[in-house]
Image: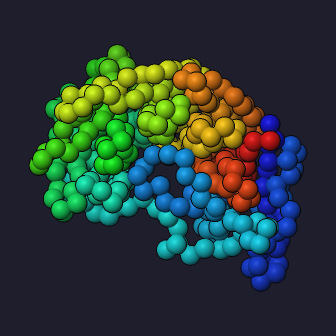
């Protein structure tokens, strides 16, 4: 596969030496590793060019991405007249999760949004009853809240033996009825994490389905993506179980009707990681059609975080169809975009040493 490094030396000289024109006429150099000039060696983060309002990757491919330099300057990368452009962008135009005050919320809380019967979902009731701190602090959530389309606020509370070990409650339509379900990580203090799916019925939040707890305290999982991975017309949910110790990628489907349903695991494959211990960053996996077969694939780091892996579920079985070396330590979320405007996606990541990489299919 082609490994592309964005040639920031040429970009920055154009941006700062030509009145912030920001345009460069050559794409990243495929299959070649370049020495990055000192002046361009600090990219702090990379963000999607469109906000991930629902909180979970589902295959969208914006045509722009945003980088933030260590000095704080934010710049958009996009296609302009057949060439790639990099231009400074004002802070107010950068897509963000909603972070407004909600009372009794967890630190660094993210609100998921959807223009449906559930308009907002977020985690509440911060507490310190679980000593795992896998997300970098000692606080976890004890409650889940939503705002309905009628403006009514509802809340679901866990008992003191459990927490929501997450930063967000994702909104995704798992059963195809046109309305979102709520997906988050529910953890037992004694038995570890599970995937939980909630819905709203009448004037209350109910739990529709939950996978078994992993079985041991201090064992966690991270949601990866939601899409129709096998082409059967139904949305599946993907997550990585124990992403820090030989992570297992699992794909499941919500089955059944009414208030009691199941998350049926369709397949699983080991050797992946989409989280770093202590990090607040949960979005280190993306999904889009990598190989052009019409089905979304799951792109995420390998277990040692030294490779980027592409996993397909064509035919109903998970299989690694591509693998690319990562020349450093990932320091950002994975961002999917179609920067070249060719209808095919690229994956952008920034590394701990300040470099930015683009990964794409041949």
Residue at image point 50% right, 46% down: 58
Q: Quadrant of residue 15?
A: bottom right
Give the camera-side residue of 148 and 308. 148
Left or right placement of residue 47 versus residue 13 in this view: left
Residue at image point 21% right, 28% down: 260
Residue 95: x and y in percent read 50, 64
Q: Is residue 237 visible?
A: yes
Give the camera-side residue of 177 and 362. 177
Residue 302: x and y in percent read 63, 29
Query: How many marks on residues?
Result: 0
Left or right placement of residue 262 versus residue 288 in this view: left
From the viewer's perspective, is residue 277 above or below residue 262? below
Give the camera-side residue of 253 and 351. 253
Residue 166: x and y in percent read 37, 40
Q: Quadrant of residue 319?
A: top right
Q: Quadrant of residue 213?
A: top left
Colouring used for the render? rainbow
Residue 315: x and y in percent read 58, 24
Residue at image point 65% right, 67% down: 76
């Amino acid at each position: 596969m082609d490994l592309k490094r964005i040639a920031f030396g040429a970009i920055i000289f154009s941006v700062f030496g030509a009145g912030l024109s920001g345009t460069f006429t050559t794409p990243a150099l495929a299959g070649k590793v370049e020495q990055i000039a000192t002046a361009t060696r600090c990219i702090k983060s990379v963000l999607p060019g469109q906000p991930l309002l629902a909180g979970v990757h589902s295959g969208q491919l914006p045509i722009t991405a945003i980088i933030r330099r260590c000095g704080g300057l934010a710049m958009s990368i996009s296609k302009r007249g057949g060439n790639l452009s990099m231009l400074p962008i004002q802070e107010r135009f950068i897509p963000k999760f909603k972070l407004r005050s909600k009372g009794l919320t967890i630190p660094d809380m993210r609100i998921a949004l959807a223009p449906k019967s559930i308009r907002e979902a977020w985690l509440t009731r911060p507490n310190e009853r679980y000593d795992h701190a896998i997300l970098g602090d000692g606080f976890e959530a004890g409650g889940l809240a939503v705002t309905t389309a009628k403006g009514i606020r509802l809340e679901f509370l866990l008992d003191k033996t459990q927490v929501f070990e997450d930063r967000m409650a994702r909104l995704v339509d798992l059963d195809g009825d046109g309305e979102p379900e709520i997906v988050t990580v529910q953890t037992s203090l004694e038995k570890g994490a599970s995937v939980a799916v909630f819905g709203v019925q009448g004037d209350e939040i109910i739990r529709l389905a939950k996978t078994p707890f992993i079985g041991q305290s201090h064992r966690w999982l991270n949601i990866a993506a939601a899409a129709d991975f096998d082409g059967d017309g139904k949305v599946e949910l993907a997550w990585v179980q124990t992403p820090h110790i030989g992570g297992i990628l699992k794909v499941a489907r919500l089955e059944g009707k009414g208030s009691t349903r199941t998350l049926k695991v369709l397949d699983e494959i080991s050797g992946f990681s989409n989280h770093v211990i202590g990090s607040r960053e949960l979005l280190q996996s993306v999904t889009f059609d990598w190989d052009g077969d019409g089905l979304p694939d799951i792109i995420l780091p390998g277990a040692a975080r030294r490779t980027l892996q592409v996993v397909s579920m064509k035919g109903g079985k998970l299989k690694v169809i591509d693998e690319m070396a990562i020349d450093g330590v990932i320091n950002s979320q994975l961002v999917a975009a179609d920067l070249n405007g060719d209808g095919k996606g690229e994956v952008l990541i920034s590394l701990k040493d300040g470099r930015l990489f683009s990964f794409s299919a041949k």
